């Protein structure tokens, strides 16, 4: 929210993509660690990451309807929310590839 209030997206426009990518890596890592150790763990980890990303974006959407933002701070769900979800899931897939390369079980 601080980035939007201070209009820092103009200075660093990719911060949103990077933060969702890294949060996808973090959520998937935690899900992978908590779930059982088999192939299904990878699928469950990505699915859980997707669910958390969707829940986060829905909470942002609800927050914006309860506390209206200034016009220049409005998000358009398809362009912002969907891409945030995609980058979070991509971050999750990348961390699973890293786990495979490092042979982390």
Image (cartoon, rainbow, N blue to C red):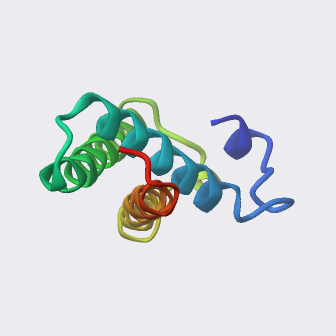
Residue depicted at 62% across the width and 36% down the height: 1
Q: Quadrant of residue 65?
A: top left
Pick the front one: 32 or 15: 32
Residue depicted at 42% across the width and 41% down the height: 29
Residue depicted at 44% across the width and 64% down the height: 97
Q: Is residue 62 visible?
A: no
Residue 72 vertical position relative to residue 35 in the rendered view, above or below: below
Q: Quadrant of the C terminus?
A: top left
* Residue 81: x %, y % from top left: 40, 59
* Residue 43: x %, y % from top left: 18, 56
Q: Quadrant of residue 71?
A: bottom right
* Residue 51: x %, y % from top left: 22, 46
| Name of the residue lying farthest toward the left | 40
Residue depicted at 59% across the width and 61% down the height: 17
| Name of the residue lying farthest toward the front | 103
Pick the front one: 70 or 38: 38
Residue 66 vertical position relative to residue 10 in the rendered view, above or below: above
43 sits to left or right of 33: left
* Residue 64: x %, y % from top left: 42, 40
Pick the front one: 85 or 62: 85
Q: Quadrant of residue 13?
A: bottom right
65 sits to left or right of 25: left
């Amino acid at each position: 929210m601080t980035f939007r209030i201070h209009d820092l997206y103009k200075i660093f426009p990719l911060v949103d993509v990077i933060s969702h990518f890294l949060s996808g890596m973090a959520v998937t890592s935690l899900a992978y660690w908590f779930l059982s150790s088999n192939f299904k763990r990878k699928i469950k980890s990505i699915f859980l990451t997707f669910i958390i990303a969707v829940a986060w974006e829905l909470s942002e959407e609800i927050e914006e309807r309860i506390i209206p933002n200034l016009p220049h701070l409005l998000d358009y769900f398809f362009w912002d929310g969907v891409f945030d979800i995609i980058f979070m899931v991509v971050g999750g897939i990348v961390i699973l590839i890293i786990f495979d390369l490092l042979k982390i079980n």
